[in-house]
Amino acid sequence: MKRVISISLGLWILSINLLRIWPISKGEQYYRRLEEWYLLAAKGKWNEAGKVAIQLKESDISAFIESNRSEELKKKLNELTIKNPKNADDWMEMATVFYRLDRKDEAYKAINNAYKLDPIREDISKVYFTFQTSLLR
């Protein structure tokens, strides 16, 4: 009797732990695909992003595509360029826009300015040092 109880308890614990590891929610799987699409699109890997987009709703990706069109990015960059004085957030945003416009040298200058203004901030430091290591390759 003790053996039957211990085996059934062991199976029950095993099944609970498997459910924690195994994603059962379709919503969670969809969100992961959408997140993957955002990362690929932000990096400009449109061919790979297109393969993931097949499984996504158009409404979920259209706003991102609209706000990251070249014309929209240039408009945003113009607004940031005109703005004075610039803080670390402005320079960080400019670096992102320059990068998405494939203007890597200007993106590096912008992230460098952001890093000079706030070298302690973690997100700025990560981007700054990522640029540093990519320049060494």
Image: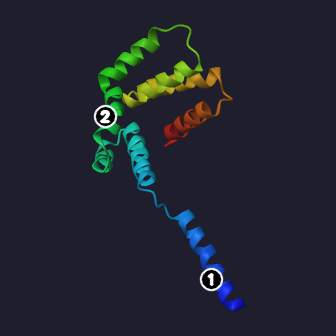
Task: Give 81 or 79, whichever is nearer the viewer.
Answer: 79
Counting labels gives: 2
The amino acid on which the numbered mark 1 sits, given as a three-letter code, is Ser
In percent of width and height, residue 7 lies at 64, 85
Residue 68: which disc? none
When the figure is inspected, residue 19 is found, relative to residue 118, above or below; the finding is below
Q: Is residue 105 visible?
A: no
Residue at the far front in the pictured view: 1
Left or right, residue 64 beside residue 6: left
Q: Secondary structure at mark 2?
A: helix
Task: Give 107 or 18, whichever is nearer the viewer.
Answer: 18
Q: Mark 1 or 2 closer to N-term?
A: 1
Residue bearing the label numbered 2: 62
- Dot 2 crowding, Cα within 10 Å, few <14, some 14–19, many 20+: few
Q: Residue at x 61, y 25 (%)?
A: 115
Q: Secondary structure at mark 1?
A: helix
The amino acid on which the numbered mark 2 sits, given as a three-letter code, is Ser
Q: Nearer the viewer, mark 1 or mark 2?
A: 1
Residue 8: which disc? 1
In the picture, the quarter occupied by the N terminus is bottom right
